[in-house]
């Protein structure tokens, strides 16, 4: 199987499932945890697929420069509404976060 994008990585797909699960789980946390435990869990979960996407992109980007510019905020490394490669699953983080 040829990888065309970081979205083809099974580990990225599992990471996106984890993000979705964490956001759904932390919605049920008490309000006083909103800016403590909930936020920390959400940021940690988002960092997994974000770092995978950024690493894959940096490794596979064709660049003439020897330095690699930053890809920006980790959330910009992947879309908030991503489809799995076979189209069987959609991660709609905007629905969960919003």
Image (cartoon, rainbow, N blue to C red):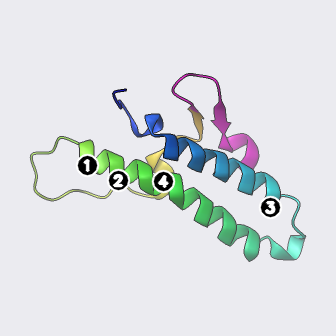
Residue found 73% across the figure and 51% down from its top? 21
Q: Are marks 1 and 2 in contact (CB under 8 Å)?
A: yes
**Which residue bears the numbered disc 2?**
55
Q: Are marks 2 and 4 in contact (CB under 8 Å)?
A: no
Position of 28 relative to 1 (above/below): below
Point out the tag, 3 or 1, that comes first from the N-terminus.
Answer: 3
Q: Secondary structure at mark 1?
A: helix
Residue found 50% across the figure and 46% down from its top? 11
| Mark 1 crowd level (few <14, some 14–19, many ≥20, 10 Å Cα) | few
**Which residue bears the numbered disc 1?**
59
Residue 17: which quarter of the image? top right
**Which residue bears the numbered disc 4?**
50
Q: Secondary structure at mark 2?
A: helix
Residue found 61% across the figure and 60% down from its top? 45
Q: Is residue 93 magenta?
A: yes
Residue 80: which quarter of the image? top right
**Which residue bears the numbered disc 3?**
26
Specify whether 36 is left or right of 50: right
Position of 28 relative to 62 (above/below): below
Which quadrant, please, contains the N terminus?
A: top left
Q: Are marks 3 and 2 in contact (CB under 8 Å)?
A: no
Q: Position of residue 74 (x, y in %)?
A: 47, 57
Q: Is residue 65 magenta?
A: no
Numbered range of the magenta stretch: 83-98
| Mark 4 crowd level (few <14, some 14–19, many ≥20, 10 Å Cα) | many
Residue 93 or 9: which is nearer the viewer? Answer: 9
Residue 95 or 25: which is nearer the viewer? Answer: 25
CA gap, disc 4 and disc 3: 19 Å
CA gap, disc 3 and disc 1: 33 Å
Q: Secondary structure at mark 4?
A: helix
Whether residue 42 appears in this view of the structure is yes
């Amino acid at each position: 199987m040829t990888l065309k994008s970081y979205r083809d990585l099974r580990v990225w797909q599992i990471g996106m499932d984890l993000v979705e699960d964490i956001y759904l789980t932390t919605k049920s946390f008490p309000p006083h945890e909103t800016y403590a435990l909930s936020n920390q869990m959400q940021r940690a979960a988002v960092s997994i697929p974000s770092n995978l996407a950024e690493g894959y992109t940096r490794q596979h980007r064709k660049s003439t420069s020897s330095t690699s510019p930053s890809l920006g905020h980790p959330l910009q490394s992947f879309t908030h509404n991503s489809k799995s490669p076979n189209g069987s699953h959609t991660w709609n983080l905007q629905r969960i976060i919003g």
